[in-house]
Amino acid sequence: MHAQTKNRKQLEDRKGASLKKIEETNKILNQTREQKESNLTKLNLIKQKIKVQETLIQTINEEIEFYDIEIKESENIIVALDKDIREMKSEYAAMVVIAHKYSGSFDQLAYIFAADNFRQMALRYQYFKQYSAIRTNQLTQIQAVTQTLERQRAALLKKRNAKAKLAGVKIKEANNLNVAKTQHDEVLKELSAKEVQLREELEESKKALLKLEKLIVDLIEEERRKAIAAEKKAAALAAAAAKKKNTNSASSNKATAASNKAIKDINNNVALSANFANNMGKLPWPVSKGRISQHFGKHAHPVLKGVYVENLGVDIVTVSGEQVKSVFAGKVMTVAQVPGMNYVVMIQHGESFFTVYAKLKSVNVTTGQQVQRNEILGEVYTDKSNTSELQFQIWRNEQKLDPENWLHDK
């Protein structure tokens, strides 16, 4: 029973998480309701909603199965308790008949004193005493079992009501799923009639991504050259400090201090990268409210047949005016403007890791600034279709990483 309770609690938590995701998705979809023209973000968002809705219904089915098991167990317990009470009442009735036979004090005393000897008389006395205690105990047991039976029946009624309520939720969510599927088909049909426009938008998006990728790669290459130069400089300073170790000159102390600072900076960068690596699956989301509208990597275009698109990170659709935050401490490498991506902020986290935040309306930080985890970087951009979408990327040197593996599960 304890394991069932634990598993049902897990199902309830999963159901709550699904409902929260659906609510968040609906808020984002409602933002674009006034914009009648459909777009790919809306289509992808509805797909995500359908997936979560299906998961929710499956969770509800599993929860109902748990209630079925618990209801059956409660029914079996009630049947067993009913049987016990009937048997105990039958035994008690027999005791009452016997007790009635010797109900008079005179009859009991006559029976006791009619004994052949003192030992027999003592045994008869003890019998009446014990029999009275048994009757009292039997009555107490009947009352206790009756109370337990009443509690079980109340618990059974509660479980049946909870199951009925859950069945009602299932019907409601099944209807919501059908509505979402119909909405998806309508948006897909509308977009399918705009093939030329979609291909033009795809080409523009590819150009913007290529420009963004080139900016990122160039900055990482530049940072690598700086790191190599810094290591060489640190080694040279260390050698100079060692050469002047036995002198007490000011130049010797200056060389030692410079060497120590260079080595400390390198070690700090190494430590920060290691710290970032240890936070895989634990990083906060760059926006408080948002759903992933397009995943990392290569995917078939949702409308154009035979066409594939590649995402360098993830697209997170959110609400208008949402603030974008740094997912980890680091140094702002650049604040740039890329056509099709608006403002872009790139942050370095130690020697190896980089995060990129694109499609910003405004920026609150500057190049070279040190930022902390959850520090506000700017505000997300909202386009003419009323869509607010952040492009978020994570790199390890020149290697693109899937941000979903790094962000904590919402």
Image (cartoon, grey):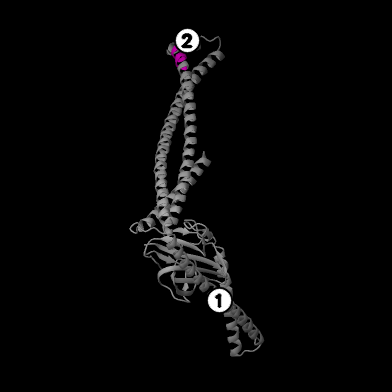
Circle 2 residues within 10 Å: few <14, some 14–19, many ≥20: few
Depth check, front residue: 367 or 401: 401
Q: Which mark is residue 19?
A: none
In depth, the one of 94 and 259 nearer the eye is: 259
**Crowd class of label 1 (few under 14; some 14 to 19; many from 20; radius 10 Å):** some
**Residue 352 vertical placement versus 291 (above, below):** below
State the residue at coordinates (47%, 66%): 203
**Is residue 10 inside the magenta stretch?**
no
Q: Earlier in the sequence, mark 2 or mark 1?
A: 2
What residue sits right under mark 1 in the picture?
Answer: 223
Residue 71 in sight: yes
Q: CA–CA distance between discs 2 and 1?
A: 112 Å
Q: Position of residue 292 (x, y in %)?
A: 46, 58
Tags 2 and 1 in contact by the CB under 8 Å rule? no
Q: Nearer the viewer, mark 2 or mark 1?
A: 1
Amino acid type of the residue tagged 1 in the rendering:
Glu
At label 2, the amino acid type is: Ala
Res 396 → quadrant: bottom right
Which residue position is annotated with label 2?
110
Would you place residue 372 above or below residue 30 in this image? below
Residue 244 location, x and y as percent? Answer: 65, 87
In this view, the residue in front, 264 or 55, is 55
Magenta span has 97?
A: yes
- Span colored in magenta: 95-101
What is the x, y in percent for residue 73?
49, 33
The answer to whether any part of residue 281 appears in the image is no
Q: Residue at x 50, y 20 (%)?
A: 130
